[in-house]
């Protein structure tokens, strides 16, 4: 049975899951990933969702304010052996609901071109391509997306 828990970035299960995420990204992108690492600090995040299957931590995601009306989705990950079960979609839906509860109207995110499964998830959930924003401007590997939460 899947359960979701709202926590902060300091939560031990979230920290363990993001270490697995970082290893996955390093395997996909190699040295290129080092340029993204400064943008992936997670301990200071206040809005984190961890997913559990029978009390085993299997996935996570977070958001942080981007501007007064927009959040940025960060650190989305599901352990490989639990993928394909709708867990990422449930995490994302919980993050979006939480952002709406806090008064945000939109969500943006960045993912990499080699993460076709992530791009597919976000597109299926209503995210649409936008111009690369912030630190991702001019980065050809980055795919940036946006969704209105209203």
Image (cartoon, rainbow, N blue to C red):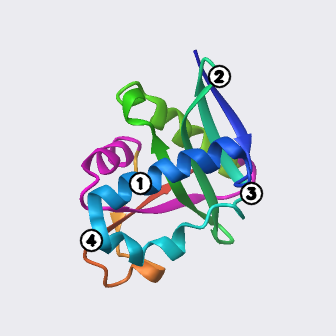
One can see residue 102 in this view? yes
Between circles 2 and 4, the one closer to the viewer is: 2
Mark 4 vs 3: CB contact within 8 A: no
Return the residue at label 3: 46
Instruction: Give the mark nearest the N terminus, 3 or 2.
Output: 3
Q: Is residue 44 magenta?
A: no
> Helix or strand or loop: what does disc 1 sit on?
helix
Mark 3 vs 1: CB contact within 8 A: no
Counting other residues with Cα less than 10 Å from the Cα at mark 4, is it few (<14), some (14-19), or many (20 or more)?
A: few
Which circle marks residue 141 in the picture? 4
Which circle marks residue 110 in the picture? none
Q: Residue at x 37, y 57 (%)?
A: 25
Which circle marks residue 23 in the picture? 1
Instruction: Give the mark nearest the N terminus, 3 or 1.
Output: 1
Write the start and end of the magenta stretch as one range. Answer: 101-125
Counting other residues with Cα less than 10 Å from the Cα at mark 2, is it few (<14), some (14-19), or many (20 or more)?
A: few
Q: Residue at x 41, y 42 (%)?
A: 125
Tell me the CA gap for discs 1 and 2.
23 Å
Please identify the quarter of the rendering in which residue 94 is found: top right
Q: Residue at x 69, y 61 (%)?
A: 43
Instruction: Give the mark nearest the N terminus, 2 or 4.
Output: 2
One can see residue 97 in this view? no
Between circles 1 and 2, the one closer to the viewer is: 1
Tell me the CA gap for discs 4 and 1.
18 Å
């Amino acid at each position: 049975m899947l359960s979701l828990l709202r926590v902060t970035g300091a939560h031990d299960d979230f920290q363990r899951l993001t270490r697995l995420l970082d290893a996955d990204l390093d395997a996909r992108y190699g040295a290129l990933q080092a340029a993204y690492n400064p943008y992936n600090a997670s301990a200071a995040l206040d809005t984190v969702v961890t997913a559990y299957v029978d009390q085993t931590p299997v996935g996570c995601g977070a958001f942080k304010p981007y501007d007064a009306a927009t959040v940025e989705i960060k650190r989305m990950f599901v352990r490989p052996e639990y993928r394909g079960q709708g867990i990422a979609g449930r995490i994302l839906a919980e993050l979006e609901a939480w952002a709406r509860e806090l008064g945000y109207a939109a969500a943006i995110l960045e993912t990499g071109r080699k993460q076709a499964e992530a791009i597919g998830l976000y597109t299926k959930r209503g995210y649409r391509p936008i111009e690369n924003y912030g630190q991702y401007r001019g980065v050809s590997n980055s795919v940036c997306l946006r969704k209105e939460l209203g």
